[in-house]
Image (tube, rainbow, N blue to C red):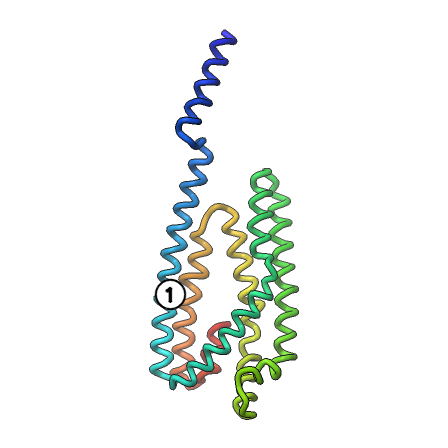
Amino acid sequence: MAHQKDRIRLSDVEGASRSGLTEEAGKDVAALAKGGGIQVAGQFVQRGFTFIFAILAIRILATGAYGIFRQIAQVLTILSQLGLAGFNYAAVHFIARARAAHDPGAVRGAARAAVIGTTVASALVFAALLVWANPIATLFEKVPHDESNFVHLLRIGALYIPAFGLMQTLRYCTQAYKTMIPSVKVGNIIQPIAQVVLGVTALLAGFAVAGLVASLV
Protein backbone atom coordinates (compact mmCIF):
# COMPACT_ATOMS: atom_id res chain seq x y z
CA MET A 1 0.00 0.00 0.00
CA ALA A 2 2.88 2.32 0.92
CA HIS A 3 4.63 1.50 -2.36
CA GLN A 4 1.43 2.27 -4.27
CA LYS A 5 1.15 5.70 -2.58
CA ASP A 6 4.78 6.41 -3.41
CA ARG A 7 4.10 5.52 -7.07
CA ILE A 8 1.06 7.84 -7.11
CA ARG A 9 3.10 10.72 -5.68
CA LEU A 10 5.88 10.05 -8.17
CA SER A 11 3.42 10.05 -11.07
CA ASP A 12 2.00 13.39 -9.87
CA VAL A 13 5.47 14.92 -9.79
CA GLU A 14 6.31 13.52 -13.22
CA GLY A 15 3.00 14.87 -14.60
CA ALA A 16 3.75 18.31 -13.19
CA SER A 17 7.23 18.15 -14.67
CA ARG A 18 5.88 17.20 -18.10
CA SER A 19 3.38 20.04 -18.05
CA GLY A 20 6.18 22.42 -17.11
CA LEU A 21 4.03 24.40 -14.65
CA THR A 22 2.22 23.68 -11.44
CA GLU A 23 -1.41 24.75 -11.21
CA GLU A 24 -0.48 27.74 -9.03
CA ALA A 25 2.31 28.78 -11.39
CA GLY A 26 -0.07 28.48 -14.34
CA LYS A 27 -2.52 30.81 -12.61
CA ASP A 28 0.31 33.28 -11.97
CA VAL A 29 1.29 33.21 -15.65
CA ALA A 30 -2.32 33.74 -16.72
CA ALA A 31 -2.70 36.65 -14.28
CA LEU A 32 0.54 38.17 -15.58
CA ALA A 33 -0.55 37.85 -19.21
CA LYS A 34 -3.97 39.33 -18.47
CA GLY A 35 -2.45 42.16 -16.47
CA GLY A 36 0.02 42.91 -19.24
CA GLY A 37 -2.75 43.02 -21.83
CA ILE A 38 -4.84 45.34 -19.68
CA GLN A 39 -1.86 47.62 -19.11
CA VAL A 40 -1.09 47.82 -22.84
CA ALA A 41 -4.73 48.66 -23.59
CA GLY A 42 -4.64 51.31 -20.87
CA GLN A 43 -1.50 52.83 -22.36
CA PHE A 44 -3.21 53.11 -25.75
CA VAL A 45 -6.21 54.83 -24.15
CA GLN A 46 -3.98 57.21 -22.20
CA ARG A 47 -1.88 58.12 -25.26
CA GLY A 48 -5.06 58.68 -27.25
CA PHE A 49 -6.52 61.12 -24.73
CA THR A 50 -3.15 62.85 -24.35
CA PHE A 51 -3.04 63.33 -28.13
CA ILE A 52 -6.58 64.75 -28.15
CA PHE A 53 -5.68 67.05 -25.26
CA ALA A 54 -2.62 68.36 -27.13
CA ILE A 55 -4.62 69.02 -30.31
CA LEU A 56 -7.34 70.94 -28.47
CA ALA A 57 -4.87 72.90 -26.36
CA ILE A 58 -2.78 73.97 -29.36
CA ARG A 59 -5.88 75.02 -31.31
CA ILE A 60 -7.11 77.16 -28.41
CA LEU A 61 -3.70 78.47 -27.32
CA ALA A 62 -0.77 79.62 -29.39
CA THR A 63 1.91 77.01 -30.03
CA GLY A 64 4.40 78.95 -27.92
CA ALA A 65 2.06 79.03 -24.92
CA TYR A 66 1.50 75.28 -25.18
CA GLY A 67 5.28 74.86 -25.29
CA ILE A 68 5.56 76.67 -21.95
CA PHE A 69 2.97 74.31 -20.51
CA ARG A 70 4.97 71.32 -21.75
CA GLN A 71 8.09 72.69 -20.05
CA ILE A 72 6.22 73.11 -16.77
CA ALA A 73 4.70 69.63 -17.08
CA GLN A 74 8.12 68.08 -17.72
CA VAL A 75 9.67 69.76 -14.67
CA LEU A 76 6.79 68.57 -12.50
CA THR A 77 7.03 65.04 -13.92
CA ILE A 78 10.73 64.79 -13.07
CA LEU A 79 10.27 66.22 -9.57
CA SER A 80 7.29 63.94 -8.91
CA GLN A 81 9.51 60.92 -9.55
CA LEU A 82 11.91 62.27 -6.93
CA GLY A 83 8.94 62.69 -4.62
CA LEU A 84 8.02 59.02 -4.99
CA ALA A 85 11.48 58.06 -3.70
CA GLY A 86 10.89 54.45 -4.80
CA PHE A 87 8.14 53.83 -2.23
CA ASN A 88 5.74 52.69 -4.96
CA TYR A 89 8.08 49.84 -5.94
CA ALA A 90 8.71 49.02 -2.28
CA ALA A 91 4.94 48.75 -1.77
CA VAL A 92 4.62 46.11 -4.50
CA HIS A 93 7.55 44.09 -3.18
CA PHE A 94 6.65 44.03 0.50
CA ILE A 95 2.88 43.71 0.07
CA ALA A 96 3.33 40.79 -2.32
CA ARG A 97 5.74 39.12 0.10
CA ALA A 98 3.35 39.63 3.04
CA ARG A 99 0.47 38.20 1.00
CA ALA A 100 2.53 35.14 0.14
CA ALA A 101 3.17 34.66 3.86
CA HIS A 102 -0.58 35.06 4.59
CA ASP A 103 0.13 37.98 6.92
CA PRO A 104 -2.62 40.64 6.59
CA GLY A 105 -1.03 42.78 9.30
CA ALA A 106 2.20 43.00 7.36
CA VAL A 107 0.23 43.89 4.21
CA ARG A 108 -1.38 46.82 5.99
CA GLY A 109 1.92 47.81 7.54
CA ALA A 110 3.71 47.80 4.18
CA ALA A 111 0.98 49.87 2.55
CA ARG A 112 0.94 52.32 5.45
CA ALA A 113 4.72 52.71 5.42
CA ALA A 114 4.74 53.28 1.66
CA VAL A 115 2.00 55.93 1.84
CA ILE A 116 3.66 57.74 4.76
CA GLY A 117 7.07 57.56 3.10
CA THR A 118 5.74 58.95 -0.17
CA THR A 119 3.86 61.70 1.66
CA VAL A 120 6.99 62.85 3.51
CA ALA A 121 9.30 62.60 0.49
CA SER A 122 6.91 64.35 -1.89
CA ALA A 123 6.18 67.05 0.69
CA LEU A 124 9.91 67.80 0.89
CA VAL A 125 10.17 68.05 -2.90
CA PHE A 126 7.03 70.21 -2.96
CA ALA A 127 8.55 72.60 -0.41
CA ALA A 128 11.86 72.67 -2.28
CA LEU A 129 10.07 73.62 -5.51
CA LEU A 130 8.27 76.50 -3.81
CA VAL A 131 11.58 77.78 -2.44
CA TRP A 132 13.71 77.23 -5.53
CA ALA A 133 11.15 77.95 -8.24
CA ASN A 134 13.01 81.09 -9.29
CA PRO A 135 16.43 79.41 -9.90
CA ILE A 136 14.66 76.63 -11.82
CA ALA A 137 12.83 79.20 -13.96
CA THR A 138 16.14 80.83 -14.95
CA LEU A 139 17.10 77.57 -16.66
CA PHE A 140 14.20 78.02 -19.09
CA GLU A 141 13.57 81.75 -19.45
CA LYS A 142 16.02 84.66 -19.55
CA VAL A 143 13.53 87.51 -19.88
CA PRO A 144 12.54 88.74 -16.36
CA HIS A 145 8.81 88.95 -17.21
CA ASP A 146 8.77 85.43 -18.63
CA GLU A 147 10.86 84.20 -15.71
CA SER A 148 8.33 85.61 -13.24
CA ASN A 149 5.48 83.96 -15.16
CA PHE A 150 7.36 80.65 -15.19
CA VAL A 151 7.84 80.85 -11.41
CA HIS A 152 4.13 81.52 -10.95
CA LEU A 153 3.18 78.53 -13.09
CA LEU A 154 5.61 76.23 -11.27
CA ARG A 155 4.08 77.17 -7.94
CA ILE A 156 0.56 76.62 -9.28
CA GLY A 157 1.53 73.11 -10.33
CA ALA A 158 3.57 72.25 -7.24
CA LEU A 159 0.69 70.33 -5.64
CA TYR A 160 0.95 67.88 -8.54
CA ILE A 161 4.02 66.37 -6.85
CA PRO A 162 2.37 65.04 -3.64
CA ALA A 163 -0.88 64.27 -5.47
CA PHE A 164 0.91 62.19 -8.11
CA GLY A 165 3.04 60.48 -5.46
CA LEU A 166 0.06 59.31 -3.43
CA MET A 167 -1.84 58.20 -6.53
CA GLN A 168 1.09 56.16 -7.83
CA THR A 169 1.81 54.53 -4.49
CA LEU A 170 -1.82 53.50 -4.02
CA ARG A 171 -1.93 52.20 -7.60
CA TYR A 172 1.11 50.03 -6.96
CA CYS A 173 -0.43 48.76 -3.72
CA THR A 174 -3.33 47.37 -5.77
CA GLN A 175 -0.92 45.80 -8.27
CA ALA A 176 0.55 43.72 -5.45
CA TYR A 177 -2.76 41.84 -5.49
CA LYS A 178 -2.05 40.50 -9.00
CA THR A 179 -4.54 42.78 -10.72
CA MET A 180 -4.00 45.70 -13.07
CA ILE A 181 -7.62 46.79 -13.54
CA PRO A 182 -7.89 49.33 -10.65
CA SER A 183 -4.49 50.79 -11.49
CA VAL A 184 -5.25 51.13 -15.19
CA LYS A 185 -8.67 52.65 -14.51
CA VAL A 186 -7.17 55.37 -12.34
CA GLY A 187 -3.90 56.13 -14.11
CA ASN A 188 -4.69 55.40 -17.75
CA ILE A 189 -8.39 56.25 -18.07
CA ILE A 190 -9.72 58.51 -15.30
CA GLN A 191 -6.66 60.75 -15.03
CA PRO A 192 -6.27 61.57 -18.77
CA ILE A 193 -10.03 62.03 -19.25
CA ALA A 194 -10.15 64.38 -16.27
CA GLN A 195 -7.20 66.33 -17.64
CA VAL A 196 -8.89 66.75 -21.03
CA VAL A 197 -12.20 67.88 -19.50
CA LEU A 198 -10.70 70.19 -16.87
CA GLY A 199 -7.96 71.53 -19.12
CA VAL A 200 -10.23 72.40 -22.04
CA THR A 201 -12.80 73.90 -19.66
CA ALA A 202 -10.08 76.07 -18.09
CA LEU A 203 -8.91 77.20 -21.53
CA LEU A 204 -12.42 78.10 -22.66
CA ALA A 205 -12.86 80.03 -19.39
CA GLY A 206 -9.80 82.10 -20.29
CA PHE A 207 -7.27 80.78 -17.77
CA ALA A 208 -4.72 80.02 -20.53
CA VAL A 209 -1.53 78.17 -19.47
CA ALA A 210 -2.32 78.53 -15.76
CA GLY A 211 -5.54 76.59 -16.37
CA LEU A 212 -3.66 73.76 -18.08
CA VAL A 213 -1.16 73.55 -15.24
CA ALA A 214 -3.99 73.48 -12.68
CA SER A 215 -5.64 70.66 -14.65
CA LEU A 216 -2.56 68.52 -13.99
CA VAL A 217 -3.26 68.72 -10.28
- Which residue lies at the image location 37% right of the left edge and 51% below the top edge? 37
- Residue at the limit of the structure toward the top, as seen here: 1
User: Local crowd at mark 1 within 10 Å, few (<14), some, or many (≥20)?
Assistant: some
- Which residue lies at the image location 42% right of the left edge and 80% below the top edge? 202
Q: Is residue 152 above or below residue 78?
A: below
Q: Is residue 143 above or below residue 13?
A: below
Q: Residue 121: percent from the left, percent from the top?
A: 64, 64
User: Looking at this view, is 189 or 17 the one in front?
Assistant: 17
Q: Residue 182: percent from the left, percent from the top?
A: 45, 54
- Which residue lies at the image location 43% right of the left edge and 81% below the top edge? 67
Q: Is residue 125 above or below residue 189?
A: below
Q: Residue 89: percent from the left, percent from the top?
A: 56, 54
* Residue 44 as seen in the image, left or right of residue 138: left
Q: Is residue 196 above or below residue 136?
A: above
Indicate the quadrant where residue 116 lies: bottom right
The residue type indicated by label 1 comes to: Arg
User: Looking at this view, is 123 or 125 the one in front?
Assistant: 125
- Which residue lies at the image location 39% right of the left edge and 52% below the top edge? 38
Q: Residue 150: percent from the left, percent from the top?
A: 53, 84
Q: How many marks?
A: 1
Secondary structure category for the residue under label 1:
helix
List the residue tagged with mark 1: 47
